Image (cartoon, rainbow, N blue to C red):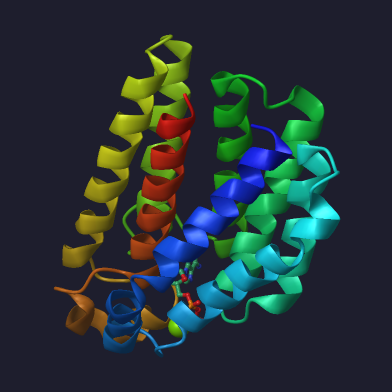
Amino acid sequence: MDTAFILEAAQAVNQAILSHEADIESLDREIGDGDHFINIKRGCATILDMQGELAPLPPDVVLQKIGMKLLSTIGGASGPLIGSFFIAMAKSVKEHGADQLPQIATAFAAGVDAIRQRGKADVGEKTMLDVLIPVSQTFTRLTAEHVARGEILATLQGVAEQGMLSTRDMIATKGRAAFLGERAIGHIDPGARTSQLVIHTICDLATRRN
Ligand code: ADP
Ligand code: MG
């Protein structure tokens, strides 16, 4: 994972988020406060604005700068969570590198763990972590088993989708949806949906790059 890939991924994710506006908005209107699309869109725009500054820098510095910037630009509960994801990934990439898939899996796991700690949440609480934790665990396991790259990327897309769908029948215990109790049942969590979309998009990009 080099800087060019991170910046290409940012563009692809921005496109994917913009083309799912109605879907994402309606999910956060149903069980949140309707701002999730705006928050994520603002995060994407912020990264794209930084492209010129980031292009000559090594990937760990790029991730660190993105994380710091997102902490102050994305609002809501998701801003600090996503910011801390990038900062923890940056630290891991600095320490272990990101040339090979196992190192990327390690960095991703560090990022997800930072969200888990900051959000004080885990699997089963109807949040983005219902996508991110199973994807991270599968990513780590499949790279350790030396599964072929294409198969890993396709599997992660499937796991992300399952995780996203699993939030539909959950009661939320974290975030705004927690106030709804049983009324949240039947609705997919917006953060889980955007996380799935991001993972799907980045795996597609990585597959095409192979
Ligand atoms: P806000 O909840 O402040 O309106 P957003 O709408 O941008 O912020 O983000 C909402 C999403 O953030 C939720 O759908 C959920 O996935 C995620 N989320 C909320 N609280 C937590 C938490 N404590 N841990 C992990 N994710 C959370
Ligand atoms: Mg919201």
Horizontal and vertical percent position of residue 136: 46, 37
The N terminus: image quadrant: top right
| Closer-to-camera residue (197/189) | 197
Estimate the x, y position of residue 48 in percent, counting from the top left.
67, 64
| Image position, residue 30 (x, y; %) | 26, 86
Q: Which residue is drawn at 23% across and 79% down?
A: 184
Q: Nearer the viewer, residue 81 or 197?
A: 197
Is 135 on the left or on the right of 170, as rendered?
right
Quadrant housing residue 82: bottom right
Please indicate whether residue 28 sits to the left or right of residue 43 in the image: left
The reply to whether residue 157 is visible in this rendering is yes
In the image, residue 169 sits, relative to residue 58, either above or below, namely below
Q: Relative to 170, is 126 on the left or the right? A: right
Residue 91 lies in quadrant:
top right
For image coordinates 63% across by 23% down, the residue present is 103
Residue 173 shows up from this direction? no
Query: Quadrant of residue 153 in the image?
Result: top left
> Quadrant holding ligand 2?
bottom left
How many numbered dots are placed on residues in this image? Answer: 0
In the rendered structure, the answer to whether residue 15 lies left or right of residue 105 reads: left
Image position of 56 with respect to 45: above or below = above
Identify the residue shown where x is 35% and y is 53%: 130
Residue at 85% across / 57% down in the picture? 53
Residue 26 at x, y percent in the picture: 28, 84
Q: Is 177 drawn above or below residue 165 in the view shown? A: below
